[in-house]
Image (cartoon, helix red, strand yellow):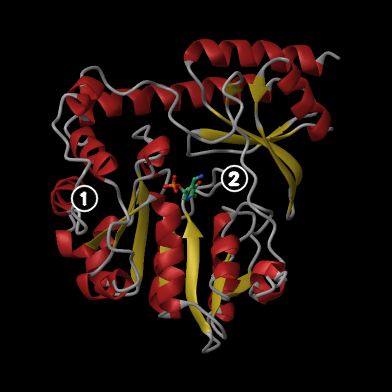
Amino acid sequence: METKLSNVEGFVRPEVRKLVPYQTKHMPECIKLDANENPFPWPAGMREALFSQELAFNRYPDGMGTELKTCIAKYTGISSEGILIGNGSDELIQLILLTFGGLGKSMIIHPPTFGMYQIYARLTETTVVEVPLLNGLDLDTEQMLKAAQVPEAHVCIVCNPNNPTGSLFPREEILRLVRESGKIVVVDEAYAEFAEETLIPEIENYPNLVILRTFSKAFGMAGLRLGYLLGQPQTIALINRVRPPFNVNLFSQKAGILSLDYLSEYQGQIEQIKAETKKLQTALKLVPDLTVYPTRANFILFKPNDPDRWASEFLKRGFLVRNMGMLPSLGKCLRISAGLPEENERFIRAVREISAL
Ligand code: PMP
């Protein structure tokens, strides 16, 4: 029989046809200040402890993540039934929208904020409603509440501290949104360990509050893809219905369990990262014609007069920074995360050089 030449593109879902693949930069030769990671190696002994374990990689991992959830329960004070683990917190954003979003439903976000919310909305056919931050920095709770009034609004995402601005929003404002909207309010606390503020203790009061956390930032495990979601058990059980059965691999589960034995070492790293962020901020503030935004995370958003030129000058000097492009109210900005102390010293020298060009 004759083989038909199939028009593969013709089978593609309309919403996928419009998608552009997410581009990530992989430039290991550069000093990476572009992805808000923890630049320090794991606490002494942790790597050895992890690699010396006998792990049965020929078997599927514990699909329920029982031991990891027990450790996270101890760390957060939320019972295991109120925890869902994910292949990075990215996956959990998708699971939230698969559960509560979809065609005809909407999600409210506050641009400028983390870009993956939009991407998962598109994949799940959820409509995005944008309520921009006031002056690009402050939560517009009134407008968010207004947007939440329509029945199709199901989910509202607050990123706290916010990526990319670094702003920490007042907890009362977020709680007002939780109370008065009655919708599913997701608080993304990816950077909470640096801000040392969390809404976790409020979970017991609100079945519509869920909190997203990750091991990618303070715990230095971005490469292992491990995140978790906290909420009341009934809410978590609903989201658990759409979770793939073995979504977190065995190695990452074990690394997560182990890391929580090293909390005081991590706390030392967090203090150092906070001090380094301050040092970078102080140095940037001394540069004329450069706006530096306040931050409570491990990164800094700033605005030179010609961000594209600055980004390429940084790259010439071996630094990878995040060019944020055009942000609502703020315009074109760059974002850097704190590197190792010696990297930051070199970065500050590069800033002075570029500003003198
Ligand atoms: N939320 C925020 C605000 C982030 O900045 C990031 C990572 N850049 C994530 C979630 C995703 O983190 P991960 O998937 O690595 O857990």
Q: Nearer the viewer, residue 245 or 81?
A: 245
Q: Is residue 89 above or below residue 321?
A: below
Disc nearest the viewer among 1 and 2? 1
Secondary structure at numbered mark 1: loop
Q: Amino acid at mark 1?
A: Pro
Task: Left or right? Give the position of 337 relative to 208.
Answer: right
Position of 186 relative to 253 (above/below): below
Q: Residue at x 68, y 62 (%)?
A: 19
Give the residue number, with chain letter if any, for mark 2: 164
Q: Is mark 2 within 8 Å of ligand 1?
A: no
Residue 314: percent from left, percent from top: 72, 21
Lower position in the chain sequence, tag 1 or tag 2: 1
* Relative vertical location of residue 256 with respect to residue 170 in this rendering, above or below: above
Q: Which residue is under mark 1?
A: 61
Q: Quadrant of residue 264?
A: top left
Q: Is the CB of mark 1 within 8 Å of ligand 1?
A: no
Q: Secondary structure at mark 2?
A: loop
Q: How far across and down, in percent of the image, does residue 95 sit?
A: 40, 66
Disc 1 packing (10 Å; few <14; some 14–19; many ≥20): many
